[in-house]
Amino acid sequence: KNQVEQSPQSLIILEGKNCTLQCNYTVSPFSNLRWYKQDTGRGPVSLTIMTFSENTKSNGRYTATLDADTKQSSLHITASQLSDSASYICVVTRSNDYKLSFGAGTTVTVRA
Amino acid sequence: EPEVTQTPSHQVTQMGQEVILRCVPISNHLYFYWYRQILGQKVEFLVSFYNNEISEKSEIFDDQFSVERPDGSNFTLKIRSTKLEDSAMYFCASSDEVLGLYPLHFGNGTRLTVT
């Protein structure tokens, strides 16, 4: 079954600290993996897209990693800011039909 | 930066009524999508639209749902007879390529409340 599981479901961190979010997937055949940031009441915004051959991709303070062998990805947020408070969604694309499978998201709350 | 715009931002309707949710995708994009997100749940695919026809739809997208691109710019989702369980955020999205390496651009959604 094509599933995307994210952990933790939610986390609270202090401003300035780092955190890492996890995404495990069973989607096959694999095309790419995307991380989206969704602010409350807004649409998801793309942070990174990674293909099979990419291990790491950064977008400012966000760094995504991908291990296509173990079907795991992580999103690392460095030096968190209050504006990082959001839901982070892992989305995996299947290569045969380009269907997207969404994770349930990790809700990050950054506190001053 | 161009963006996907959706109207209205919030729609309240009574059960059994028809609603039309409107979207203006990014102008040079060719692929259009509707997704929904029930409060606290995952984003769910409804339908994709390309070359003026539905290219794929999910099991959620039953006969009560329809999509149109009436004038080459607007992209609409119609729910013919709303049910309580249709209450959700509805997101329109567009892409300039079938979902390979190009990001999917989402609008900020329409919150539909069915009473």
Image (cartoon, coloured by chain):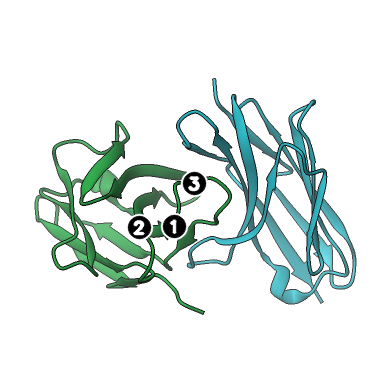
Chain colours: A cyan, B green
Q: Tell me what residue is drawn at x 76 percent, y 34 percent.
A: A72
Q: Earlier in the sequence, mark 3 or mark 2?
A: 2
Q: Chain of mark 1?
A: B
Q: Quadrant of residue B28?
A: bottom left
In-front residue for pair B62/B50: B50
Mark 2 element type? loop
Q: Residues within 10 Å of mark 1 (few under 14, many from 20)?
A: many
Disc 1 marks which residue?
B95
Give yes or no for contact between labels 3 and 2 (Cβ–Cβ under 8 Å).
Answer: no
For label 3, the residue is: B99
Viewer-closest of B9 and B31: B31
* Residue denoted by label 2: B30
Q: Is residue B96 above or below residue A74?
A: below
Q: Is residue A86 left or right of residue A73?
A: left
Q: Are marks 1 and 2 on the same chain?
A: yes
Q: Quadrant of the C terminus of chain A?
A: bottom right
- x and y, in percent, of residue A82 in the image: 74, 75
Please tell me whether mark 1 sits on a helix, a strand or a loop: strand
| Pointer 3 local density, CA inside 10 Å: few below 14, some 14–19, many at least 20 | many
Q: Secondary structure at mark 3?
A: loop
Work out whether mark 1 precedes mark 2 in sequence or the reverse, and give the earlier one. Answer: 2
Real-space CA distance between mark 1 and mark 3, rounded to the nearest whole angstrom: 7 Å
Residue A93 position, x and y percent, is 56, 38
- Determine contact: label 1, label 2, CB under 8 Å: yes
- Tell me the subunit letter for badge 2: B
Which amino acid type is shown beneath numbered disc 3?
A: Leu
Local crowd size for mark 2, using a 10 Å CA cut-off: few (<14), some (14–19), many (≥20): some
